[in-house]
Amino acid sequence: MSLLGNVLKGGIKLTNVVQRKKINPFKLQKKTFSKLVSKARYTQFGEKYHFEVIQSASLFGYEREFYELFKQHVPIYDYNSIYQEWWHRTLAGEKNVCWPGRVKYFALSSGTSEAASKYIPVTKTMSKAIQKTSIRQILTLGRYQQLPAAIYEKGFLMLGGSTSLSYRDNHFEGDLSGITASQIPFWFQQFYKPGRDIASERDWALKLDEITAQASQWDIGFIVGVPAWLQLLMEKIIAYYKVNNIHDIWPNLSVFCHGGVSFEPYKKGFEKLLGRPITYIETYLASEGFIAYQTHPNAAGMQLVLNNGIFFEFIPFNERNFTADGQVMPNAETLMIDEVEEGKEYALLMSTCSGAWRYLIGDTIKFISKKRAEIVITGRTKHFLSLCGEHLSVDNMNKAIELVSSDLNIDIREFTVAGVSKDTLFAHQWYIGTDDKADANDLRDRIDAKLKELNDDYAVERRHALKDVSVTVVPASTFYKWMESKGKLGGQHKFPRVLKKDLIADWQNFLEKQKV
């Protein structure tokens, strides 16, 4: 067993012993908040919204005075509102808008439901915060007793966007994964794959081909990325080398660090590509910051990063605070971390060291442990179905697909759902992406039955206004072809789980052209 691996594993274990202490979420968040407003108090945003007064209250006021003032002075923003009022000036190169100095990097972020890219500022402070949280996550590996010491010397394959960023109007822009990979510390370079040259490739298909051709030369222990794209890559590698599974190429592969979407619908198909079980670690890294990560084996959720450049608020995700289309109401109730309840659904607000303030990121979460600040992602504020009160969340959909694919022993690679009219009532139209043999009517009945078990509101409405459910089965590649047609192939891009408005017709027209 290698000396370096033993030293690294021993150091990581020691660090975990030192760090294994109780956390006080409120105190950590108050301290983080104070640092953020102190740093930004002389920016244009900070001066308009009285950050100096708010920061003084965080230091010298009564316990919650700072938060009451923050809510009183600063409105809730979504991307469109903060961009139109503030970030467009940051993008134009103006200094000291929402964060001190000039922002050099912007992460291009858009769900497939957005027509244009969003420009999310990535400050130097945020880049350092993401690196710091990434190192913290690596240190948690000491809690995974089953990992051999030698694994700490193996390669890390990080499958993300191109590190060759576009330079435009005095700033660089690209996927956040490309920005962070381009700034990897020198000491990590020897472990990092696919290496600078391949990582800079902008053509996603060519990048996968180049990784595949080099794969047999690497000793990979860790893989990092979005499940759908890593599964596609492993299939290419297995086919290229004509082997039985990925462990025939990478015998030391032991850890998959995944994020971006729920892994559960992909897990069954993913595990068919393995020669033995591996460890799964979930992360929550968005373009706006590194939000949470799994901190210990068999954790049911991820722990929020409470002390590294992000202040969190939580909006109860209900009809009082959101419209039927997922728009936040003007006077929505917001809570700090000590005010939340386990098991309830919340929309996430973030204030960050990149100059996001009370920013509605668009994700919904649930706390599974308030004491440990552990959460699970349940969906998106605009990606849910409630045509007639069925309140069907992405979390419900993911679970139903996971259960059905397990029952039928098939690999459902992708899926999406559209809410449509049915005479004077409503219906759900499912599109299931699988390359396995599957009967659409059987899938419909099974998915419908699972959702009735998972969601009481759905069960009620299926007896009343939600009149019909239908399923169309298409090859998994159809989903990726549609994304390619939108210029959203690879990297951090995901297919939307719920199709609404113009996207429904767009998807259906695409299927007609594909002659599915």
Image: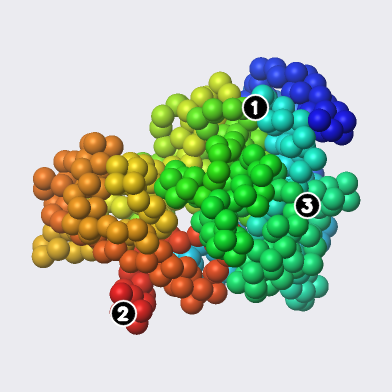
Write down the residue under mark 2: 515
Q: Tell me which label, 2 or 1, sits earlier in the chain.
A: 1
Disc 1: which residue? 146
Q: Position of residue 250 (x, y in %)?
A: 67, 49
* Residue drawn 45% across the image and 50% down it: 269
Quadrant housing the N terminus? top right
- Residue beneath the point at 41% across and 29% down: 343
Going by the numbered disc 3, the residue's amino acid type is Tyr
Q: CA distance from mark 2 to mark 1?
A: 49 Å
Residue at 14% x, 63% y is 422
**Image quarter for residue 222?**
top right
Mark 3 near mark 1, Cβ–Cβ under 8 Å?
Answer: no
* Helix, strand or loop under label 1: loop
Rounded to the nearest whole Å, what is the CA distance between mark 3 and mark 1?
23 Å
**Quarter of image, res 407:** top left
Q: Are marks 2 and 1 in contact (CB under 8 Å)?
A: no
Name which quarter of the figure residue 471 lies in: bottom left
**Amino acid beneath label 1:** Gln
Of the residues shown, which amino acid type is indicated by label 2? Lys
Query: Which residue is nearer to you in this view: 49 or 223?
Result: 223
Q: Residue, x 11% and y 62% (percent of image)? A: 424
Q: Which-is-in-front pick, marks 3 and 1?
A: 1
Q: State the SS at label 2.
A: loop
Scheme by which the image is coloured:
rainbow
Q: How many marks?
A: 3
Give the Cα separation between the discs numbered 3 and 2.
42 Å
Q: Which mark is residue 463?
A: none
Task: Pinpoint residue 321: horizontal percent, then vertical percent.
Answer: 39, 44
Disc with the residue nearer the chain's start (3 vs 2): 3
Residue assigned mark 3: 192
Reply above or below: 379 against 492.
above
Is 205 left, or right, of 401 in this rendering? right
